[in-house]
Image (spheres, helix red, strand yellow):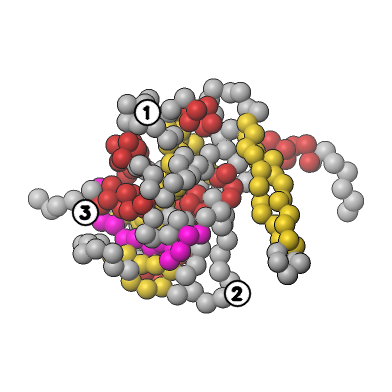
Amino acid sequence: MKEKKRPLILVTNDDGITAKGIRTLINIASQLGDVVVVAPDKPQSAMGHAITINDTLYVKEFKLHDYDHKEYTTSGTPVDCVKMASHEILERKPDLCVSGINHGSNSAINVIYSGTMSAAMEAGIEGIPAIGFSLCDYNADADFEPARPYVESIIKQVLENGMAKGVLLNVNIPKATAEELKGIKICRQANAYWVEEFDKRTNPYGKDYYWLTGKFVNDDKGEDTDEWALEHNYISVVPTQFDLTAHHYIKELNTWAFES
């Protein structure tokens, strides 16, 4: 009997190839398929869907340990990593792209700014089933072990069931012990946002500079949101899409009297 071919899994992130989160994700993915890693050579958090168009891109093979799989770093953004993997590095289309595990939340409005989720979204645009994983802990030495069985389970389910075209998963994991984690909830994105301001300062040469600051506000009281799930120690899974059309508003716009 012919042996079933293992799925090809592309692993990427926005925290850089040496981050603890991606090393955990690589370890999990390696149990489920053949892995190729293409990740930034330095932290690229909050890059959103940025791509490199006015500068050169560099790719080089990366060796951290004596692994069986191949790893590469790029000088570009998380989205650049997926593009380079798809068009230059991989010999065939991956069966899955997993991005993360991010150090910090990508729930609610954070999905818009996230390099982690944008890498997954780029994979989705290219027709590759994709998942973005994030742990709500910004510590460089965060504990990813409690999340391991859930991450593995979600990857297995996507490999077994596939994904609808244009859909990817945004998975956020609360900072909690294995005993505190209550399981997985399928959610919608909370209507929550950042109230931002800039901290203006002056350097010793008299030149003004700014630090972006702010606070996160959640006015969404629904119990079906990612924020509610995370607050109650559930892992939130939000089906996400890159079609940003406000379909419900097309009918309204058609009533406007635009000049010809």
Mark nearest the camera among 3 and 1 is: 1
Image: 62 above or below 105 = below
Residue occupying the point 39% across, 44% down: 142
**Residue 169 lies in what quarter of the image?**
top left
The location of residue 67, given as percent across then percent down, is 22, 62
Q: Start and end of the magenta stretch?
A: 32-44
| Residue 205 located left or right of residue 18 | right
Q: Residue 54 got which mark?
A: 2
Q: Residues within 10 Å of mark 2 (few under 14, many from 20)?
A: few
| Residue 200 located left or right of residue 109 | right
Which residue is nearer to you in this view: 32 or 13? 13
Helix or strand or loop: what does disc 3 sit on?
Answer: loop
The location of residue 215, given as percent across then percent down, is 64, 39
Is residue 34 visible to the viewer in this orientation of the structure?
yes
Is residue 132 visible to the viewer in this orientation of the structure?
no
Which residue is nearer to you in this view: 96 or 36? 36
Mark nearest the camera among 2 and 3 is: 2
Tell me the amino acid under the disc marked 3: Lys
